[in-house]
Amino acid sequence: LAGQIGDPQVRNRGTMGGSIANNDPAADYPAALLALDAVIRTDRRAITSGDFFTGMFETALTPGEIVTAVHVPRPIRGCYRKIRNPASRYALAGAFVAQTAAGVRVAVTGAAPAVFRWAAAEAALARDWSAAAIRPLSLDPGGLNSDMHAAADYRAHLVRVLVERAVDAAISRPGPRVKDQPVEEVSPCPCCPRIRRRSWPRRSAGCNPGTGSPWPVWLPPGDRPPARSDR
């Protein structure tokens, strides 16, 4: 999920605590925390994710209260998928599905004034953890966002499609990344030399592929490409 937020500069400057305290209706982290039944700890108390997000840009935090930690239970499996706005990269609609020891949870972001759980999808996946279980469902567009980017009924359609994709991805995705995995060769953009990466996730070198951004992807010192004399 984190790799789908903004760009490398945003991800290296922003924090999870700041994102959830702001509670933008199109933010990604609220969907993850709600789907995973996370607990948000502050300098005063512990708040479950179900009680933390209360409305558009609204949370259960009181004036002066600071998020100090987020505790996320490990799910049996789960996945997040979104359709992002090409300019802001915020979620036009996003869905996080999680199969946990306590049951199935489906959280939706970007489609409504605040993150919410889709109960009908949770019930269907509890009976049959497959994309086929979601296809007959339809999300009521009443109360969903409708703006210059997408109408409410279109967002409702996107949510169903994204839940299907997330379930498929959760079923097929490999196990946790390990440090001793085989070396993988990366094809960077034309302006950058070919390098290899170890276990770093997603992109490793070059300009930000597929986004048109001229800003380079940050690299750990040991993985930086050699300097070029023609730059």
Image: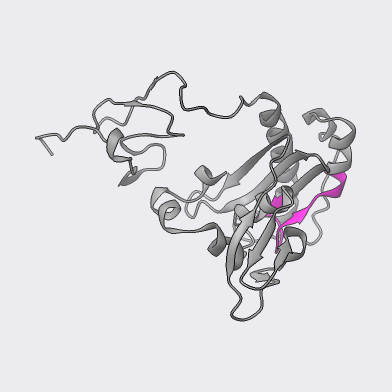
Q: Position of residue 107 (x, y in %)?
A: 74, 49
Q: Position of residue 231 (x, y in %)?
A: 13, 39
Farthest residue toward the front? Answer: 44
Where's the N terminus, which quadrant?
top right
Q: Quadrant of residue 164?
A: top right
User: Is residue 20 in view from this perspective?
Assistant: yes
Magenta range: 108-121
Against 78, residue 110 (above or below) is below
Q: Is residue 115 magenta?
A: yes
The residue sitting at 73% across, 39% down in the picture is: 163
The residue sitting at 61% across, 62% down in the picture is: 20
Q: Quadrant of residue 225?
A: top left
Q: Is residue 149 magenta?
A: no
Residue 183 lies left or right of residue 129; in this view the side is left
The residue sitting at 41% across, 42% down in the picture is: 211
User: Is residue 109 in view from this perspective?
Assistant: no
Q: Quadrant of residue 210?
A: top left
Residue 28 lies left or right of residue 132; in this view the side is left
The residue sitting at 38% across, 36% down in the picture is: 209
Residue 205 lies left or right of residue 28; in this view the side is left
Farthest residue toward the bottom? Answer: 63
